[in-house]
Amino acid sequence: MCLFSVCTGSHVLLQLALFWGAYSQQAFRTQPRNTTVREGANVVLKCEVLRVTGVVQWAKDGLLLGPHRSLPGYPRYSITGEQRRGQYHLMIEKATLGDDSPYECQVGPSETSQAIISRTAWIDVQIPPSQPYIEFETLEPWVAGKVYTVTCTAPDAKPAAEITLFKDGVELTDADSFTMSGSEDKLLNTQAEVRVMALSSDNGRQVACRAKNPALPGAIVSSKTMTVYFPPHPPVIIGLESEEVKAGTVLKLKCLSNGGNPLPMMHWKKNGEFLSRDWEEDIISWKAESILTMEVTPEDNHAVLECGSGNQVTPKPLAIRQTLTVFFEPSEVTVLGSFRVIEGQTLSLSCYTSSSNPPVQIRWWLGFKELNSTNVTMSDGEHGGMATMSNLTHTVSREENGLPLSCETFNKGTRFSSMKTNNLIVFYPPQKVWLDVPSEGIQLRSKTTVRLVCYSSGGSSTGSLTWLKNGKVVSHASRQVTSQRGVSRELSLVLQPSDNMAVYRCDATNEAKKALSAQTRLHVLFPAITVKISVKQETLRTGETAILECLCGSSNPKADIRWSLGSERLNGVDQASKKAEHGGVAFSSKLSLRLLFSHHGQKVTCQAFSPVLSEGVNSFYTLSVLFPPEFAPAQPELVGVVEDDEVTMPLMVSGNPDVSDCDWTFRGEKLVKERDPRYGWDEGFAMTIRNVTRRDGGKYAVDCTNEEGQSRVIITLDVSFAPSVRMKTDPVYVDVGGTADLLCVADANPIIPGMFSWKWLGEGEADLSSQNEDGDTGWLTLFEVTRSHAGWYQCTADNGIAPPATVEGQLIVQFKPQLKKGPQWSKVASRGDGVSKAEVVCQAEGVPKVHFTWAKNGAMMDLNNPRYLEQTVTEGVLHTSTLTILNVSALLDYATFTCTGRNSQGEDALDVQLLSTNRPDPPSDFRLVGVTHNSATLEWMPGFDGGLTQKFRVRYYWEGSTSYQYVDVFPPKATSFRVTSLLPATTYNFSVNALNNMGESSYADNNAVVTATTEKDPAAGEDPPTDDDSAPKGLYGLPIYLTVVLAVAGVALLFGFNSLGFFLFIKRTKGRSLAVAVSFPRLPPSSHSFSFVAPCSLALSLNLSTPCLFPFPQAVSPLSVCFSSHLRVSSLAPYLSLPTPNLSSLL
């Protein structure tokens, strides 16, 4: 092997390594040195090795970083330099504190050389301090005159930062500084402290802290504002010229206090109590003021007003005080004593005035005469005033009755005057009392009404009448009535037994306290007061004799006793009588009765009858007779129920004692709840069955027992259920002109006449008059059936039990094929270029299925020819045959194609002409469908589309319009359209034509015009819309087409379309909003979406990835822009009423 021969691959490397290793030892040409770097800067430790044969690696803190020059795992570390020159420099980007470590460059041993290690190099990473922060000794504001400690800390620096403190720009030289450990190893915090005396001038000024170290290009400064509190100046009061004021005066006083920080809080006090704590601050003039608005009252006499001010540092509240002297009138004048007095007695009254300043004087008047028999006293009153009292004594006479008696008060100082007056009332007794009552010899019946009237005359005041019965006041007498002769009071009595021999007295009295009286005695006849029946035996049983006694209470005159049982009269035996209460007579009678079971629960009546009064008093006794169970005559023997309902079979059984048990048996088996959870019994043994089924119908035997015996009854349960129904034959086939019978069968209970009914489920009306039924079967007969009879019919069975049952049956009417014919069916267009294809469509209705054959120019076509494809699709009675002709040739394929449809009923044929593509034929049968005050609805038949997709345009004008108005129909293939935004009560002329890419047709029906006049506006008082209003508006009042064009143009510019095609349609919705859809060429899936909403309720939404239609809120008409592969610029112009070139140039 030659050392320098031309070799390849690893052989060359191996030979070179052996050659050089044999002659050299690895050595450092350049070793790393200690380096200082600022945090965030890049640093390079150089290492250059001669004759490298081993692996070169860097070690950090004794940890090898790896042999690869990219140093994986250390994104900021890399090895730089030219490796062929032995350069292995360590590059560290954006140095951090973690890079502050010792580093070594190490070269591993090889077969020819020993390992070598460089000297240790340190990287010293300098870290600038974080923003220094200042801390005051307290978080509270400083108080002027006190000393506070200010501390500044410059955290996390390397090396430690130097700190200088300033107060209002002046350096504080007596600050003490020291260092401490930072938040991380190797970082240091520097802290400086200084003591500061707070001055009022320091308020709002700043303490600053400046920190710097070698890692900073310049010093960083932090500052903090000093807030120093100091007291305000004493307050002053403005607006009180004199301390003497009159009650009712409104004072408006202002209290001012200057200076202080914070501005002082102010208050008003009266007699030590707060009146106001409201004040205003003037930060420009740096003063505080408080306004007090106060209405002076008597209570303010000698009141001390105080205005105080102070803030948080005021050592003692600052205040100014003033004392008020208030002149006020008495708040009330009161006359004490009664103006009502009996003649000959002495009248004593006092007239009292409340406190006033100065005091008032008092005089008395009786009529026009001044009374001087008075005694006046004065005393200290409220609010520092004087209270005055005058006492009057006077002996009255009858002649002074009704004269005015007055107390007059007046004050010369305040010009106050007041008078209290009352009429003097002198009392003297009534003169006469008499009665209007029945004579004492007349006998009166109880329960009759008697009027007793008492009269009185004379006296002052009028006498008060009182009725008494046997010396006790009667409270229910009527109200007293006054007349010219005197007074009267009526006592209306409904006579009671207690009124017999009672004495009624009337007393007449008044304030003179002397009574006059009159009285009468009543004689009353009354029936027995009480009637009571008692029974000798404790237990009554059928077949035994019961002994009953009737006790008759007091009656006047004596009554007769009569016995009865129901309507039956019974005879009793009368016992001896005796005197009783209210002057009446009492006695008794006994009755013996043979008991039967039917007597149980019946009432034995005892009547005490008075022949004189022709009335009696009754009492009854209910017999309780023991007997075995008995079923009532009204016990039902047949119970009906609807299936699935709940039924209760009542049990009307009685017995004494009560029936203890009743057993129910059905089909020979005793019924218990455990047999069927649907069974239940109530306390009366009536049976309830839930969710009744038809299997529950039948006879039920009931056996009831008690201590006296046993009885049985049979109850039949009849279960009714709703019908179910089915068609006997479905579907039913019939030929045109034949007769069809549709039958349905019902399962129901009961089966009732008129249970079946039929309904036609198709469109329009059908003759369903021929309906018949027989028991559970109903049928509908249709005569002379036509195609319109084909469809679904519904049979309903209703026996009165919900729900009615329905079933649907189909009638299929068989008829021969009928091909669809007309201009749009008789022509097909296609370019005869040998490439295009044509589809000839033939559509027929027929039953049964229609089979199609095709002929070309009268000759049957060979559909096996690969140029011809035929497909037939059937949907119901509609059958469609589509003949596709591939590679259409004008020479070979422009011909007449004949489609023939056949079924078992017959056949029909249609000739279709294949032509070249051209403009569409005009529509036909153009007519007006409806009109409102602002719209007209039009309809037409489409013509041949020329082999291309066609759309329609409505043209209209009205008298006074400057030009035709055009509206493109949407959807494009619609054959009816509503033109909106018309003027009310206006005549319009309408035309319609068709358009495709080849051009447009003439207007329908040989340029016919449809004339329509809109109705009057139904909204009373509203002006019709102007021409400008009739055009929909867009964003910021612009026309809608301009809004859409600007929006689309903006989208195009935004995304930088080089070639833009789109398809847009506009749908006019209620009002004037628009719905617009635009399609653009498909963009990559990474495209973006955006949207905007215009004030005119026009929303534009663009999705630049896939075709879409986003939903919008109901309040916003959507304008959705979506992308597809179609490019149709020309279709946008008609909808925006703009020519295509203008739109294209704009886009």
Image (spheres, rainbow, N blue to C red):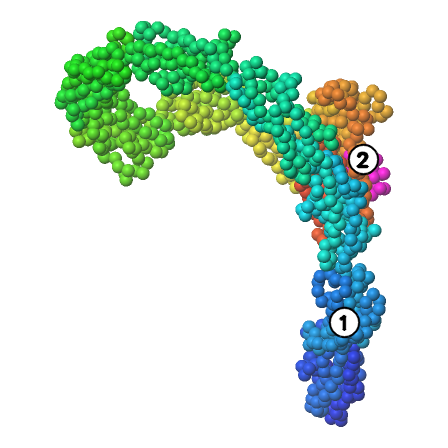
Where is residue 880, by image quadrant?
top right
Q: Which residue is mark 2?
A: 1037
Q: Pick the residue in front: 753 or 296.
A: 296
Q: Residue at x 66, y 36 (%)?
A: 386
Magenta segment includes 165: no
| Percent position of residue 824, x then y | 70, 28
Q: Is residue 1096 visible?
A: yes
Q: Is residue 1117 left or right of residue 960?
A: left
| Percent position of residue 795, x then y | 46, 25
Range covered by the magenta-colored residues: 1128-1147
| Percent position of residue 204, x then y | 80, 60
Query: Quarter holding the C terminus?
Result: top right
Magenta segment includes 1136: yes
Q: Which residue is mark 1?
A: 194
Estimate the spatial distance between the alpha carbons at disc 1 and disc 2, rounded to whole Å.
70 Å
Using the image, determine if residue 557 lies above or below residue 1134: above
The rendered magenta stretch, by its main secondary structure, is classed as: helix
Q: Is residue 504 left or right of residue 141?
A: left
Q: Amino acid at mark 2?
A: Gly
